[in-house]
Image (cartoon, rainbow, N blue to C red):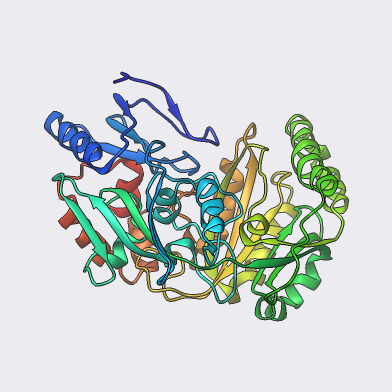
Amino acid sequence: MTARETWTNWSRSVEAHPEHVEHPASTAEVVSLVQVARSQGLPVKAYGAGHSFTPIAATDGYLLRLDRMNHLLARDTTSRRVLVQAGMSLRELNPELLALGLALPNLGDVDPQSVAGAISTGTHGTGGKLHGIAAAVVGVQLVTAEGDVVEIDEQHPWFDAARVSLGALGIITEVTLQCEPAFLLHAREEPMALPEVIERLPELIEENDHFEFYWFPHTEKALVKRNNRVADGTRRDPVSRFRHLVDDELLSNGVFGLLNEVGARRRSLVPRINGVTGSALSAREFTDHSHEVFVSPRRVRFRESEFAMPRSALPGVIAGLQAWFDAGHETVSFPIEVRFTGSDDIWMSTGHERDNCYVAVHHFFRSDPTAYFAAAQDIFTAHEGRPHWGKMNTVDASYLRDRYARFDDFVAVRDEADLKRVFTNPYLDRVLG
C-alpha cells in the first residue's frame, strides 16, 4: 500500500491524494479491497487511464488502478460477443478484436481509455445513425458496496443504468461487448468553409456513416471528415508512413504543440496561428481498418468540455460561440470539434431518446480555460445541453434532472447498489445530488 500519493489525471486538471492506491488483478481482489475500505469507513473509486477531464474518479480513500485487469477473457464466434476485463484499454482491445475478425461498431477519436472508463462516461464517437460505445455493452459484472458480485445482463433491472454508470453504482470488473465483423473505412478529409458546412449539414450527416468537422476559432475555416464503410473485397490503402509523419505527427502534434506554446505566451497571435493551422492540413483519402481510421494521435495536452444538444440547435450554438469570439473576450487556439450520434435507450447516456450534435471546446493545458468553458457552457445549456460525464462542466443535479427523463430511476438504482455512498466523491455529489 502507498499512503497519500498525489494522483493527477492525463490533462492535469484534477489532483487527488488517495490514502491507498491499489492495483487489483481480479474481481476477487476488487471485492476484498471494497470490503476493507468499507470496514475503515473510506470511499473507493476505480480508474483506467485517467483520461477524464472531470474529477469523476478522484478520491481521498482507496483508488483502484485497473491496469492489471486488462485481458480478453472469452469470445463467442457465433454471437460475436467478447468478455473483457474492465481495465483493458481500447488501444489493447482493438487489435485483439481485429485478430478475431471483429470490431466495435463505433469508437471515439482517441483510444487510451479503459473499457470501463469509456462506457461509464459515455464516450461516443460520431455517426448520425450510430451510438456511443456503451450501446455495444450486453453485460456488466459489478462489485457493489456490500462486496457482492452482480452479473447484469440485458434482462437485469439495472441494465440500462449500468451501461453508463458514472462509477456511481460500484466497481465494474468485467464487460461483455457485442461486436460485429471487422470492417474497413474509407476516410475523406478536406478543408471546407464553415458557412458551407452549416448549410450542407443535413446532407453531410445523412449521406455518411460517420461525419464530423473541426472549426478553427476566429476564422471561417473548417476541416471535415467523412468515414464510410466499403464493399467486401476492397483493398486496404492506409495513409503512407511519410504522410502520417507529416500530417499526424508533425502538423497535428509537433508543430501544433509548438504553436500552442507560442499562443499561450502571446495571445494576440492566436487568430493568425489558427488561420495558418486551418490552411496547413490538406485534403487526403485513405482506406484502413476501422479503428485505425477512428483513432487519431493526440500528443498535445489539453483540457476539454463537451455537451450534447439537439441537432437542430447546432447553427445557434455555432453563432453563439462566434459572437463570443467576435466580442474579444478571449483568443482560443484549439479547434472546436463537432460530432453527431443517433438516439439510444441508455438512461444516463447523452444520447438518451435524442439525436444529438456534440460540440467540444478545448484549451491548451497551460492556459486557464475557466472563462471560455463557462461561456461555452452557458451557450450549450441554453440549448438543452447534456454534458459529457468525463469532460469539464459545472452543472448540477437540479439542472440534469430536467435533461434526463430517467434521472430519478438511475438514482433509485444507485440507492440499491450503494446506499451508504461508498463510491461517491464531490463530483458525483454535484451531478447526482
356 is higher (above) or lower (below) than 117: below
In this picture, residue 433 sits left or right of residue 241: left
Residue occupying the point 74% across, 48% down: 328
The residue depicted at 53 percent of the width and 32 percent of the height is 12
Which sits in the foreground, 417 or 48? Answer: 48
Q: Residue 46, relative to residue 398: is it above or below?
A: above
Residue 370 lies, in percent from the top left, at 56, 41
Q: Nearer the viewer, residue 225 or 24?
A: 24
Q: Position of residue 309 (x, y in %)?
A: 53, 68
Residue placed at 46% from the left, 69% from the top?
Answer: 351
Instruction: Quadrant for residue 377, please give it.
Output: bottom right
Residue nearest the viewer, comparing 406 with 402: 406
**Any part of residue 309 in sight:** yes
Q: Residue at x 42, y 48 (%)?
A: 117
Check the image and report above or below for 129 versus 428.
below
- Residue 231 appears left or right of 276: left
Is any part of residue 408 visible from this angle?
A: no
- On the picture, is 242 further left or further right than 149? right
Quarter of the picture holding the N terminus: top left
Give the tally of numbered discs: 0
